[in-house]
Structure formats: structure tokens, C-alpha cells
Amino acid sequence: MNQDLWNKILQFDLNAQPGEYVFSIRLARENNWTRNFTKGAVLEYKKFMYLAADYDLMVSPSPIVDIVWHQHLIFTQSYQEFCNLLGKQIQHIPSTHHKTDFEKFRQAGERTARLYEENFGLQPRAFWECEDMYGSLNLGPATYKIGNTVWIGMLAFLVLIIPFYLLFRPVYVTIGNPGFVLGYLALILATFGFLEFFNRQRLRNITGLFDKESFIFNLLPYELLYLKDQNLSMVINGVVNELIINQTVVANTDNTVELTESEVADSFEQQQVVETIRSLGRPSYPNVIKAVAFKPVFQNMTGAMDGFKKYFRQSKPFGNLFNLNFFVLSVVMMLGTGRMITGVLRDKPVMQIFFVLFILFVVIAFFLARLTRQVGTQTIPGYYRETILPGMQTEEDWQWRYFLVGTAALSASFLPIVNYVNSSSSDTSSSDSSSSCGSSCGSSCGGCGSD
């Protein structure tokens, strides 16, 4: 291995161009990648370019490495400086998908794997075998979307309710009130209790399908905090509190914030908060939250976490779990509806059962909506608390402590402002973020050559 060349490649800063949209932030934004996954993809790209530069043979990138390569090609000055460092002009050769090229690209892929192993060890599956960041989750797509399941289920309910009523009518007429209502309430409580326990276990089992090297087990504290709370202002509060701790920002008693003379910023998030406060002067804190929420680095966070939730909801394992819950709760709803129809046709009082059914319908809607978020709000955060964090020095990392205890970790001078914002119900949480395809061509890349 050419250690001197590799050291130079490692030290090359792809984020050297100043601004809010530096290379890694734009790369993450356009692909909804997490911070650490983006960092890993850039490292794999550098390894690939080392092979392309150090060997006079055609090598082929993985789909993820190719995305990084496409992004770097747009940063023309940076890419040219990188090629100058490599000592070669590395050319991008797109795949034509022609059968005459198939064998050439297949050999290039095998050669890349062999050279990679000789220089760096085994290729990480998440970056070299998977088509995208979610490939390491090992979840297939659902046959039907959840929305379609709900509509089909509601139509089926309307079609089947009459046969269901006719089937159980002989039983309904033998049970009086309040015996039926009390028994029905007990059935409802038992059903929800069972489903809650079953869902938690099943969601844990589904996350057990994820590769241990998957991005989901390598989240940053703020990414995990947003995944859990779905509240971007919680993340912004944490970043501002860090700036208060290092004496870059001062929290005033009139709910404003201002910069000190030091202006030390240790992360992209801190930098963009500092720039926002500087541009606003001495702004009220709610205005800071509103402005910062749309900064690229924070939008990256919401895009990556919202993208994971959407991907998980559309997966086959979760689709099967949702369908099971929907079916069981529909049967419970049918039992009560059949009873109400029996009472109406027999001219009996039905207000009690009608009220119970109305409440049950609302609770079912809430329960199923909660189920679609549960992997992010409970399952993944719970795994971190129980499995990952006990082996880490969280006491020495303020961000992890903030994830674990919430606002209790905030500075005493800052907490009143946070409470003021919360009490005034300032809604700054980000909704599902869409991302543009940007520079990525979306097609496979055959390999590269060099002049």
C-alpha cells in the first residue's frame, strides 16, 4: 500500500468550500443520509479513488460510492484539486447497460473487491453491497401501502357487518345489559393490552433483522433525539445550550440571546446557530428557533430520520404487523356494532353501546397512528438505552445526557427561556422533508479510468 498517498487522501477536506452547503451537508441533504453514514460513504469513496489512482486497472464503485463520486464531480474545483493530489485525472465512465460491457464491468467489480481487501480489508456491506442507506435494514417492501389497507379494510367492514350480525344475533339476544357492555369493555382492554405487548416484542424482533453495522445503530444523539420526540426545537435547544456552556452565547432575562466575543463553534449545528444569531443581532429566542429550523444541517437531520420512518412504514414486516392489528381491532369493533344493530332492530336502548363504539373508534385511530411511529419513538431509543449506551461514557458526553434526561440537562440560565417558548406553544417542529435528486444521476456506474 502506498501509505504516503493514502495519508494525503485521508487529509483531503471535501468540505473546504465555505458556506452552509458544504460538500458533506449537500450530499446528506440530497440523499437523506445520516451524518455518520455520510462520513462513512465519503471514506469509502476516498478508498475507491485510492485504488483508481494507485493501480492502472479499471475499478468499479458501489452504488453508494458512485453517489458520492457524482456529488464530488459537481464541485469542480475540489474535484480537480483531488485529482491533482492523486496524480491522475480519474474519469467517470457511466454504464451503458449494453451486453458487450457487462463482462468488463463484472470483472472490474471483482477486481475492485480483491484490491480493496488487499489494502483495506473486507468491504463493509452497508456501503458496497447495498443499493442505498436502507439496504442494511434487510426489510423488503410491503405488498400494499398502509393507506390502501385502511380503505380496503373499511370497505370490507361495511360489506361483512350484516353477515357478522346475522351470525351472532342468536348470541346477542341472550345477553342483557349491563352485562354485555361490561364484558365488551373488558374485551377491549384485554385486546389493547395484548396488542401493546405483542407490538413491542414484534418491533424488537424486526429491528433484530437490521445489520449490526447499519446506520440505525450509529446515530448521533441529536438525530436520535429528533427520532424519539419528533420535535426539532428540542434539538435546537440542545445546540444553543452547548453554546451557552462554552460561553459563545448568553441567554438574557428578556428571552433574547446574543453572542459573546469568543464565538466558538465546534460543529456544523453550532456554526449555523451562531451565524443566525449574528445576522439577527439580539433576537428573541423564538425567532432564533424559527430561523435555525430551516438551516441545511437541521433539515438534513429531519430528512434522514423522517426518511427512515417512511421506509420502515412501507416495509413488509411492518405492513404485516399493521395489518394484524387492523384485523384484530376490526373484529372487536364488529362485535360491538353487531350488538348495536341488534338493539336498534329490537327497539332497545343503544346509547351506551353507541358511546362505547364511538370512543373505541377514536382510540383505534390513535392506537394505529401511534403504531406507525413506535419504532422511532420507543423501539430504537429503547435499544440505545438498554444496549448501546450502557457501554459508553455518557456522563462525559453532554449530548447523550441530554438525550437521556431531556430539559433537566439544560443550563439554569437557559431553562426559563425554553419554558417560555414551550408555554407559548411555538410550533417549530419540522414535518416530513422532501429532498431533491440534485446531482445524483440515479443510474449505475460502470467504473472509472485514468489518463
Image (cartoon, grey):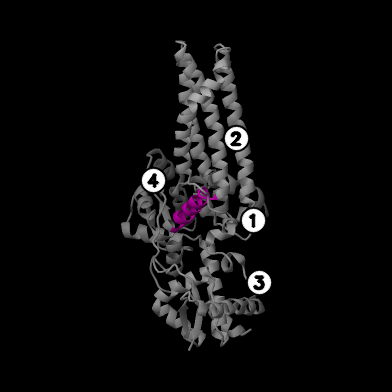
Secondary structure under the numbered disc 3 in the rendered image: loop
Residue 278, quarter of the rendered image: bottom left
Q: Report the residue marked by disc 3.
A: 122
The one nearer the camera, 153 or 40, is: 153
In this rendering, is residue 366 above or below 304?
A: above
Mark 4 or 3, nearer chain start: 3
Q: Residues within 10 Å of mark 1 (few under 14, many from 20)?
A: few
Q: Is residue 362 visible?
A: no
Q: Is residue 324 visible?
A: yes
Mark 1 or 2, nearer chain start: 2
Mark 1 or 3, nearer chain start: 3
Q: Position of residue 292 (x, y in %)?
A: 38, 55
Q: Amino acid at mark 1?
A: Gln
Specify start and end residues of the magenta stretch as a single range.
Answer: 300-315
Q: Report the residue marked by disc 4.
A: 253
Q: CA distance from mark 1 to mark 3?
A: 29 Å
Q: Amino acid at mark 2?
A: Leu
Name which residue lies at 53% across and 64% down.
131
Q: Report the residue marked by disc 1.
A: 393
Furthest residue in direction left, as rendered: 280
Secondary structure under the numbered disc 4 in the rendered image: loop
The one nearer the camera, 118 or 263, is: 118
The stretch drawn in magenta includes residue 384: no
